[in-house]
Image: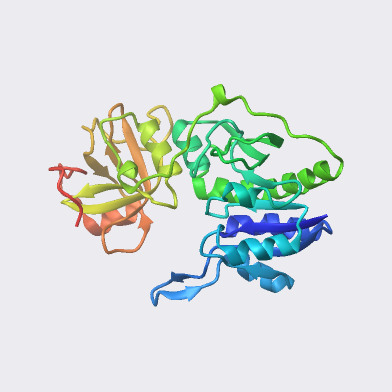
Amino acid sequence: MRIVFAGTPGTAVPGLRALTGAGYDVVAVVTRPDAPSGRGRRLRASPVADAAQELGIEVLKPSRPRDEDFVARLTALAPDVCAVVAYGALIPEHVLAVPAHGWVNLHFSLLPAWRGAAPVQRALMNGDTVTGVTTFRLVPALDAGPIHRRLRVPVGTDETAGELLDRLAVLGADVLVGTMADIEAGLAPVEQDDEAATTAPRIEVAEARLDWTVPAARLARTVRGTSPHPGAWTLLEGRRFKVLAARVDDPASAGPHPGALAPGCIEADARHLWAGTGDGALELVRVQDFGRRAMSGADWARGARPALGARFDDGGREPA
């Protein structure tokens, strides 16, 4: 079976490697054009383009998937199916019709849950304890096509969105290979239940701002769900302060605990940094102050020596 693979970030590479490793004929890779990266903002190829070059596979980098030259080349390649993992661009309907078996997407949720650009982030922010991966046939409607395969995956207690996405990318690669076998065997996909659908729009930076008046558990989920991008943040003296890792303080556990803290108020000892929330304390395990490197909350507290009564978000000024 002839396959064209479409993907861009590092999370798509396991899928590409799994298909080639399983012996499928990947005749070309489609990826986003080279983009500025790093301090020098030099143009760099995507991780998928780098992997394809290593594997000796033709790489196509259309500005838009509707470009005539790209559509002509895709048609000439005559793929039986196009496999998609985090490509990053919408495929027009007339291009969806080029391969005989359509475009099959690997999505990082249990569809119809969390249709959209940020399924892993939304699942964690929602407090889901189980998520998964789904392969489905692309249709013009967002993530609404019929399902080939699904795999349920438990969510780790402290797992961040970045960590979970990396794990799902590896597990999903095997699901993608199995889906290709299903297509070869003539197994038809099953329609989704649209009434059960939930949406997962992209996480905006403003949405990652921590509201210290809400419960600590919700704040911890926001930190996990927005790590590493865009990153949970708050304000300290009008400047942006990132919270990279956090855990809910359990007063029943052994060890030191803060006193009663008003929302956003800071307390620290030699090994801990806490902030008050709407229902208790949140331990700030790893943080990054404006213009400084990331460090443990305790190290930051020792260096910054927050004054008694210091408070996150005090005054609500815009970040520097």
Q: Quadrant of residue 278?
A: top left
Residue at 37 percent of width and 58 percent of height? 295
Residue at 25 percent of width and 31 percent of height? 213
- Image quadrant where one finds the C terminus: bottom left
Q: Is residue 158 visible?
A: no
Relative to 116, does residue 3 appear above or below in the rendering? below
Relative to 233, does residue 198 appear above or below in the rendering? above
Q: Quadrant of residue 203?
A: top left
Q: Position of residue 231 (x, y in %)?
A: 38, 50
In this rendered view, identify the residue nearer to me: 224 or 280: 224
Residue at 64 percent of width and 48 percent of height? 96
- Image quadrant where one finds the N terminus: bottom right
Relative to 185, does residue 47 appear above or below in the rendering? below
Q: Position of residue 74 (x, y in %)?
A: 68, 61
Q: How many marks?
A: 0
Relative to 139, does residue 95 appear above or below in the rendering? below
Residue at 60 percent of width and 33 percent of height? 111
Q: Position of residue 319 (x, y in %)?
A: 20, 53
Instruction: Specify whether 272 is left or right of 116.
Output: left
Instruction: Specify whether 197 is left or right of 275.
Output: right
Q: Is residue 292 visible?
A: yes
Q: Farthest residue toward the top?
A: 195
Q: Farthest residue toward the right?
A: 185
In this rendered view, identify the residue nearer to me: 182 or 280: 182
In this rendered view, identify the residue nearer to me: 138 or 262: 138
Q: Position of residue 248 (x, y in %)?
A: 39, 35
